[in-house]
Amino acid sequence: MSRAMMMAALLGMGLALPDSAATPATTDISAGAVSGTPATGGAGSAPPTAEGEDEELMRAVFSVESVDRFNHSIVVRAANGALTTIKVAPTAEGFEVHKGDQVSLDYYQGFVISLGSANAPVADTLQTPTRANAPVLGAAGARQITSTARVTSVDGETGTLELTTSDGRPHAFVIQDPAVQARLSSLHQGDRVTVTYTESVAVAISRATGT
């Protein structure tokens, strides 16, 4: 029997040849194909992040009140009169400033992490800054510090708090944490507290325009 007659006989008996004998196998790639680059933006994928994205780089003009070259920091007075200590990043240029200079700073503002009673055991809450527990402020990196402090000014309505820490340095904060904001209404000038905060860090200094 010829091959053609055999094929006709098989088909007449209801038998079919395997698909592979007729056409090559194909894969449906319409739902999740490997395209050579990772899929992005899908459900459960992590959004891209940038170092320091939770902190805002700010720019403002200050008057220099004092310069601590050993600790690479300056005490400055803001336009509203508030005094604050700002650490100057090692990479920042323009640190050759003096008392009385008007300077423009690009800086990351420090923030209060917790605020408690002055009777809290400070030794138990001190943390050595590490990559794990020190909040990152842009490229500068800021230390997390716990200290006793005296309240020099507090305004619960605007959420502003000014402190002088045990080392005599002034610090001004805008409180954003609701838990810390709730404490402001019970504070008064002269009160002593235990505060955990991150430093304000300047990443660029320049002479203010017109000075």
Image (cartoon, rainbow, N blue to C red):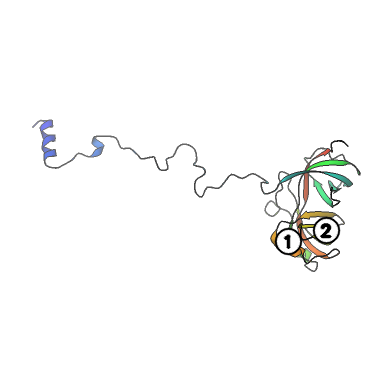
Q: Is residue 43 left or right of residue 19?
A: right
Amino acid type at mark 2: Leu
What is the crowding at mark 1: few (fewer than 14 residues within 10 Å), some, or many (at least 20)?
many
Position of residue 138 measured from the top left corner of the image (x, y, whole percent): 71, 45
**Above or below — where is 197 with respect to 33?**
below
Residue drawn at (22%, 40%) of the image? 18
Residue drawn at (11%, 39%) of the image? 12
Q: Which mark is residue 163?
A: 2
Query: How many numbered marks does the figure carry?
Result: 2
> Which image quarter: residue 167?
bottom right
Which residue is denoted by mark 1 in the rendering?
181
| Residue occupying the far left of the picture | 1
Residue drawn at (52%, 47%) of the image? 45
> Which image quarter: residue 170?
bottom right
**Above or below — where is 167 with respect to 202?**
below
Helix, strand, or loop for circle 2? strand
Q: Which mark is residue 155?
A: none
> Which image quarter: residue 208?
top right
Quadrant for the N terminus in the image: top left
Position of residue 163 measured from the top left corner of the image (x, y, whole percent): 83, 58
Position of residue 53 measured from the top left corner of the image (x, y, whole percent): 66, 46
Q: Earlier in the sequence, mark 2 or mark 1?
A: 2
Amino acid type at mark 1: Gln
Helix, strand, or loop for circle 1? helix
Q: Is residue 211 left or right of residue 33?
A: right
Q: Is residue 170 visible?
A: yes
Q: Nearer the viewer, residue 197 or 25?
A: 197
Quadrant for the C terminus in the image: top right
Q: Is residue 188 left or right of residue 3?
A: right
